[in-house]
Image (cartoon, rainbow, N blue to C red):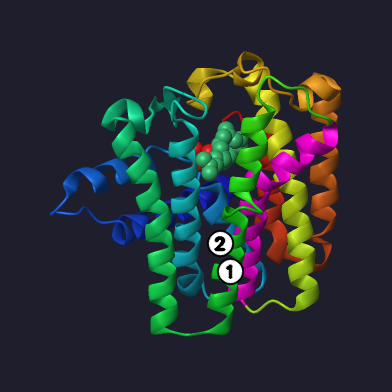
Amino acid sequence: MDFNQYLTEKKDLIDNKLDSLVPENREIPVITEAMRYSLFAGGKRLRPILTLMACEVFEGCEEDVLPFACCIEMIHTYSLIHDDLPAMDNDDLRRGKPTNHKVFGEGFAVLAGDALLNHAFETMTAIIANTPKPEYVRAMELICKASGVNGMIGGQCIDLYSENKSIDLETLKRMHGKKTGALITASLTAGAVISKAGQDDIKNIMEFGDLIGLAFQVTDDILDVSGSTEKLGKTINKDAKYHKSNFISFYGMEKSRQIAVELIEEAKQKLANYGNKGYYLSELANYIISRDN
Ligand code: GRG
């Protein structure tokens, strides 16, 4: 199957599952309306697709992995809603639509983000309570850690206190590793763990995740300068506006593009042992640096 067709198929699978996992609430409709507004606003579904891809590489059961993949997307969407709030990045546009707080107000946007995070944990614990497999517990642990103080939230903290300050390259990489990279790596690792991959393979896929996570962020910095709001569905030139350091301010545009390419080449070498099973993952690695949204 052609790669774009593959992406569309997986995206549909994820969207349908998310639709059933996050149904409308008749008692308090506003909260699920706000949750579903951002959840179905048109994200690329990169993280849950990575989870499904790891499952394919390690020949796991897609049905087992899919709900965990959807929980990761719920957590990612919560982080975007909160990141857009006036107290954080104060943005009006996300996924090509007005941000959650612009539509529902700040209070409901805070709650919609909280509710998505909570719903992800509720969904994973319900699965574990029903089928107490150790690999499910391990996958949930990985997802929680990647979202928490040592992962995404920690990265966001570094981001917040770095505003209007110049930071060194190490701090920039640490911030991105936590804020963006941790959940990308956990998406792959959770899929591998549930698919009962061996320790060496898990380590290998984590290294692959760290490399593509960094390449994703370098590309995000490139697109922040050279992309278009129309295609990206979000405001551009934000780093300059908030006087934030990024890869372009350290390396310039050309060198940053080169770094992204090198990271992806190094990542793809990690797939060498998996033959055809790693084909779509390798294509996804290419897509991460060639995307325009
Ligand atoms: C508020 C706890 C908390 C964390 C926010 C992820 C994040 C941390 C902020 C998002 C800000 C941002 C633009 C980060 C750069 C990388 C990134 C996460 C981009 C958005 O991810 P995509 O491109 O988005 O996968 P879609 O909409 O396709 O899902």
Read off the residue under disc 2: 144
Q: Residue at x 61, y 76 (%)?
A: 195
Seen as rendered, the residue at the extreme front is 161
Q: Position of residue 27 (x, y in %)?
A: 13, 54
Residue 62, disc: none
Q: Is mark 2 within 8 Å of ligand 1?
A: no
Residue 141, disc: 1
**Disc 2 residue type?**
Cys
Q: Who is closer to the viewer here, 135 or 83?
A: 83
Cα separation, mark 1 vs mark 2, equals: 5 Å
How many other residues sit within 10 Å of disc 2, few (<14), some (14-19) or many (≥20)?
A: many
Q: Residue at x 42, y 60 (%)?
A: 120
Which stretch appears magenta?
169-195
The answer to whether marks 1 and 2 mark residues whose Cβ atoms lie closer than 8 Å is: yes
- As for residue 176 lying within the magenta part, the answer is yes
Q: In which quadrant of the rendered image does the N terminus lie?
A: bottom right
As drawn, is 185 to the left or to the right of 102?
A: right
How many other residues sit within 10 Å of disc 1, few (<14), some (14-19) or many (≥20)?
A: some
